[in-house]
Amino acid sequence: MIEINKELFTHMGINEEYSETINRPSMTYWQDAWRRLKKNKIAMAGIVILTVFTLMAVIGPYMVKFTYNSTNLELLNQSPDKVHWFGTDSLGRDLWARVWMGARVSLFIGLAAAGIESLVGIIVGGVSGYLGGKADMIIMRFVDIMISIPELIFIILIMVVVGSGIMPIIIAFAITGWLRMARLVRGQVLQLKEQEFVLAAKTLGASSKRLVFRHLIPNTLGVIIVTLTMAVPNAIFYEAFLSFIGIGVRPPLASWGQLANTGAQVFEIYPFELFIPAVFISLTMLSLNLLGDGLRDALDPRLRK
Amino acid sequence: MLRYILKRFIISLITIWVLTTIVFFLIRVLPGDPFTSEKTTPQIKESMMKYYGLDKPIYVQYAKYIKNLLQGDMGYSLKFKNRTVNQVIINAFPNSAELGIRALMIAIPIGILLGIISALNHNKAWDYGSMIVAVIGVSVPSFIIGGLLQYVFAIKLNWLPVAQWKGFEYTILPSFALALSTLALIARLMRASMLEVTGQDYILTAEAKGLPVYKIVWKHQIRNAILPVITVLGPIAAALITGTFVIEQIFAIPGLGKHYVNGIQSLDYTLVLGLTIFYGAFVIILNFIVDIIYGFVDPRIRATR
């Protein structure tokens, strides 16, 4: 039996040299998120694909000597070859030029719609959550009711009334899309406004505007960014859907959904005309979804290692 | 619990009324009248306007429409002569419902199973495999899946019919095309929810008690993890309905979605109006039912409200 006594232990003391060393470099929330995002290979692949597509949307149409709307009635439904890299459609238009013009339209609609609806949602949700009480109740009942109406049916209806084209699509998305963001931001703000740093700011005499825009919204930014990233593929999908059923972007203007629509009419004989735009729509949606997943993990402080 | 049901019921009713009102006035805002395109004499046009009640002030029209709607009468289609919107719905809805139910019967069990398998094999090959399927399912729009399935199984392999709706073998491809995105959504949700449950204390307790794995999984994990999946059934139904718009178009199925899209393209306003209200009410009622089921299934909601 070993007897445990004081002699068995030695006093370590405090080593003054090490007590002040910093084990890990100090970095802000955003630096840390970016560092973690960079480690996520799948999300980075998404970023690379999206960058390439955006770049090609800018320069792609100029790489061939055909414009997106010039027809050539002697070369209808040509399979991809050296002259027409993606072939031609049923009016002899060069598909390479059309696909990248379509990329401009689709990506623009995706970004613009997601941006506008998020902005509206953040403002409404932020104000509603901050004010609380009656105003909050009225706004949220309104959101509850509007959100129960199936989104796409509402969009289709607005499109029928406003007409087709790029701007009507963005307007229709903005009218229907802000609801979810408003709900999300409101929930976050309600949680945050009870926290001590808000009380501290209030005590120091910060105005309501400053509280909402400098303290509450920046703290919900992580969640907002993830939702925004997920709203872009949603908008691109809806645009493709609307154009596919024939009320979105009208020819000769091209969008990916519109190209898929024209391709679908002849796809039993010329499948490439459907599959080429299909691949681009799918890859873009895939990349945005993967990037969104990656951002969600990167921006979640609980997952910090 | 009764108060909770009543509250949900009143919100649902208000939502249907708001939807009807918005749709009614949106349609009336449109320039021109439904008969502008037809070659008719002013007298005939006048009598048609009178017949449809379009010569009266708008609030009278609105009151009449609501009155008729409460009696279940949605008026006549403008393009299908002598057919009421009700008849169109009665003829076409069973086909759409069959398609939707078949898709659900594929999506729900397989989705839940995939989610469970990936969660139980977290970060192993099975997990990655199922999640690749899920991400692709979420990213690739249903009209592309539909086209792809048609091309591979009907045109190239000649196993199944390309289109139409005449018997069981005709339903296989469209049902799968419609089901895939829902399946993916459910699988992702089920996986996330299973993983969250795995970390809970009661699982640890169950393990500590020495329960066999299958009992822990079946009695504790799945039972608790399946709750969030129930909540998305409402939105899923909405997504399936919009999915039928394109799937019915691609596979030439005489369903409601096809009528809806054709109605939009031919500007058949009463048909679009009636179908929008029908779809909207359908989804809203479904959401109401899901809310109630959720209330019954989750004791926490029963207790708090």
Image (cartoon, coloured by chain):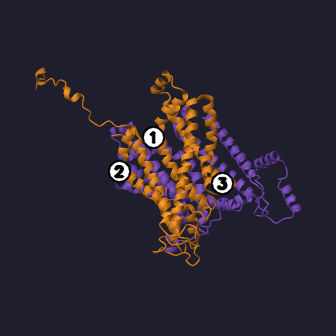
Chain of residue at mark 1: A
Q: Is residue B149 visible?
A: no
User: Looking at numbered disc 1 in the image, what kind of residue is underneath it?
Assistant: Gly
Quadrant where the C terminus of chain A sits is: top left
Q: Do labels 1 and 2 share a chain?
A: no
Q: Distance between the residues labelled 3 and 1?
A: 32 Å
**Residue A289, image x, y percentages:** 46, 52
Check disc 2 and report the residue beneath it: B123
| Camera-side residue of B122 and A46 | A46
Mark 1, residues whose alpha carbon is within 10 Å: few (<14), some, or many (≥20)? many
Residue projecting furthest to the bottom = A74
- Chain B drawn colour: purple
Check disc 1 and report the residue beneath it: A222
| Camera-side residue of B163 and A269 | A269
Closer to the camera: disc 1 or disc 2?
A: 1
Label 2, secondary structure: give it: loop
